[in-house]
Image (cartoon, rainbow, N blue to C red):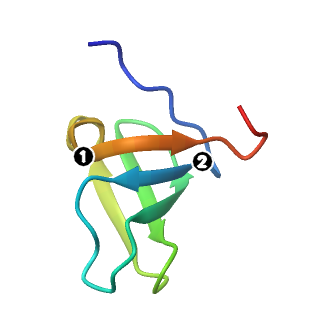
Amino acid sequence: MLPIKYEINDIVTMKKKHPCGSADWKVLRVGQDFKLICMGCGREVMISRTQLQKSTKSVKHPDGE
């Protein structure tokens, strides 16, 4: 499986929903660990690259790619 390319401001849709009901997260920081903010409630979390790649359903780039 090819690694997914993540960039700042990408919208990541997760396989499971956050308790607030939203499945979309915005990428704030990239690296070995990622900082994400929930698009529903504004909660910020840190998640490892491997966990993010396992949990990602789709990625939307802000420039429309």
Q: Residues within 10 Å of mark 1 (few under 14, many from 20)?
A: some
Mark 1–mark 2 distance (CA, rounded to whole Å): 15 Å
Quarter of the image with the C terminus is top right
Sequence-wise, the earlier of marks 1 and 2 is 2
Residue 29, x across and y down, in percent: 52, 51
* Residue at numbered disc 1: 55
Residue 38, x across and y down, in percent: 45, 73
**Which secondary structure lies at badge 2?**
loop
Who is closer to the viewer here, 2 or 8? 2
Q: Residue at x 41, y 80 (%)?
A: 43
Residue extending furthest toward the top:
2
Q: Amino acid at mark 1?
A: Ser
* Residue at numbered disc 2: 10
**Which secondary structure lies at badge 1?**
helix
Who is closer to the viewer here, 10 or 46? 10
Label 1–label 2 contact, CB within 8 A: no
